[in-house]
Image (cartoon, rainbow, N blue to C red):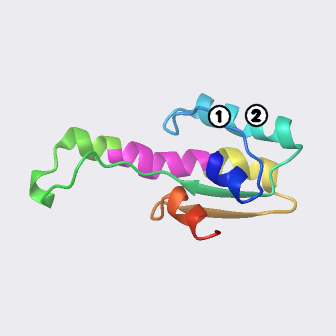
Amino acid sequence: MKLIEDIGGKGIFVKADVTKPKDVQNLFKTAVDTYGGLDHAFNNAGVLKKSYKFSDIPVEDYDTVMAVDAKGVFLTTKYEIDYMRKKAAVLSSTRHPLQEWLQTLR
């Protein structure tokens, strides 16, 4: 939040697990209730516990990565789209951390 405020923006923090539909629905409901609508979204979800040689990746870590990176982006897009249908664009990404993107705005 500090980085957003430092560049003149406003924001809120909503704790959400992007692998849980109810959390994602609450995330967008809270945003719309707070700001009156949803014009744009940057869907950025990504997790990797550590770097592995591909053949050494534990199945459990793969499952977590897929739940967050793939399902998380699917759920955020699914639940934001109805709020945005009439006037907005959706940007979905699983490659660039939000913090790095925000730092480019300085």
Quarter placement of the N terminus: top right
Judging by the rendered image, the residue that carries numbered circle 1 is 14
- The amino acid on which the numbered mark 2 sits, given as a three-letter code, is Thr
Decide: few, some or many residues near mark 2? Use Cα within 10 Å; few <14, some 14-19, many ≥20. some
Give the Cα separation between the discs numbered 2 and 1: 8 Å
Name the mark on residue 30. 2
> What residue is drawn where x is 61% and y is 29%?
22
Name the magenta segment's main secondary structure: helix
Front-most of residues 55 and 1: 1
Contact between marks 2 and 1 (CB within 8 A): the answer is yes
In this rendering, the answer to whether 19 lies above or below 47 is above
Decide: few, some or many residues near mark 1? Use Cα within 10 Å; few <14, some 14-19, many ≥20. few
2 vs 1, front mark? 1
Residue 21 in percent (x, y) is at 58, 33
Q: What are the residue bounds of the magenta stretch?
A: 65-76
User: Considering the numbered disc 1 on the image, is that residue within a helix, a strand or a loop?
Assistant: loop
